[in-house]
Amino acid sequence: MFENILRIYGLDPVTANVQQFGDGLINHTWKVNTPEQNYILQKVNSDVFKRPSDIDQNFSLLRTYLNKECPDYLFVSPVVATNGESLLHIDNGYYRLFPFIEGSVSVNVLTKKEEAFEAAKQFGKFTKLLNGFNVKELNITIPDFHNLALRYDQFTIACNEASAERLEKAAESIQFIKEHHGLVQTYNEILNNTAIPLRVIHHDTKISNVLFDDQYKGLCVIDLDTVMPGYFISDVGDMMRTYLSAVSEEETDFSKIAIRKEFFKAIYDGYMGEMQDVLTDAEKPYFVYAGKFIIYMQAIRFLADYLQNDIYYGAKYENHNFNRAITQITLLKQYIKLEPELLSL
Ligand code: ADP
Ligand code: GN1
Ligand code: MG
């Protein structure tokens, strides 16, 4: 299969070496080494992204804008194949190839607050540079992706349809989610506030979606499939979710989950260093809420998937998505406990 794809990109399958790469949950990623240059090959998950051509079109719109307005910005966009396409449709699969950013590293867990600062700066910079771009031009690659109200409704349906066994195991977590429904009301408040604008938002700011150099300075953001119109709380919140704890969302020793306050400060400084003058006074008060919004939503998504027999995220072991949900709930509990301190940092 790779042979055919490589040829369309004008690469020689005999000298190219293809290896699986990274820990993404959604797409399939391979590193392609060739004597001349290295690449990242990806198969887009078309169960999740129903119209991969919409992603490709977004890439093209963003590239055109950024190349014109900020030509020095490192925007990693797909390579155009010899047939003129930047997205290939082969054997029912959609593929694209990116230049591999040499010397870059990515991580799954942050060890230093400086890395959180750098990553937050990169995501802030991305939205800032695109502030003049007409966000309505972007295709919506996953409808209602961060619509918390809808996620909550889907979770309720998952509860109603779940097997008795899974429902019983998840009972305490379900209770927790229901007790915190107020977080959905705050989301609705934001949605109805016309002073809060839709911006170009990444929607998946986890740490593995930032490339660093070998000194851990941020190079750029990647994994742009979910770049869509959205609210800043999505990007800030997912940083809180994935940078604040020293252990990842895969941790099963829940006692290891703890919030690193200095990392919160680093996210704030990194993001606001870029976005201070972009965010409106109506948005800024929701900075701390952003963490609750996304951690809660991710808990709902993992728990709903567990109740639906792991159809979305898959499961590498029994109770995988249940454990993932507990990790998020544990994190959320700690975040809520620390909220007064976070507000005053
Ligand atoms: P997924 O949607 O599955 O998370 P990503 O686009 O995030 O896929 O890619 C997975 C991993 O591959 C990233 O975390 C990063 O380590 C690596 N990667 C992706 N694109 C590049 C690139 N252009 N240069 C270097 N590494 C990359
Ligand atoms: C997925 O593609 P990846 O692994 O970066 C998911 C995110 C979740 C994340 C949880 C399209 O991201 O929304 O936050 O897993 N992406 C999609 O790890 O559902
Ligand atoms: Mg990724």
Image (cartoon, grey):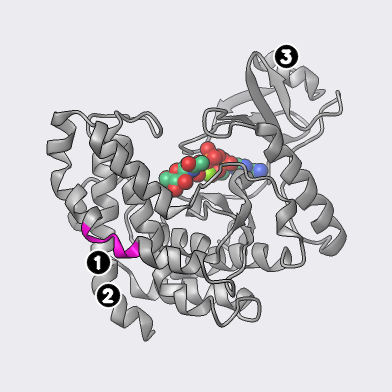
Residue nearest the observer in this picture, 217 or 139: 139
Q: Three-letter amino acid code at disc 2?
A: Leu
As drawn, the label of residue 93 is none
As drawn, the label of residue 4 is 3
Provide the residue span drawn in magenta: 179-183
Q: Is residue 336 above or below residue 103?
A: below
Few, some or many residues within 10 Å of mark 1 (<14, 14–19, 20+): some
Q: Is residue 187 above or below residue 107?
A: below
Q: Is residue 290 above or below residue 108?
A: below
Mark 3 lies on a secondary structure that is helix
Where does the N terminus fall, quadrant-wise?
Answer: top right
Question: Do tag 2 and tag 1 residues touch (Cβ < 8 Å)?
Answer: yes
The residue labelled by disc 2 is 338
Disc nearer the start of the sequence (1/3): 3
Residue nearest the observer in this picture, 217 or 174: 174
Residue nearest the observer in this picture, 94 or 41: 94
Q: Give how far apart the Cα atoms at labels 1 and 3 are.
A: 50 Å
Residue at left 48%, top 52%? 146
Query: In the rendering, at what x and y percent does residue 104 appear?
Result: 62, 50
Q: What secondary structure prevails in the magenta region?
A: helix
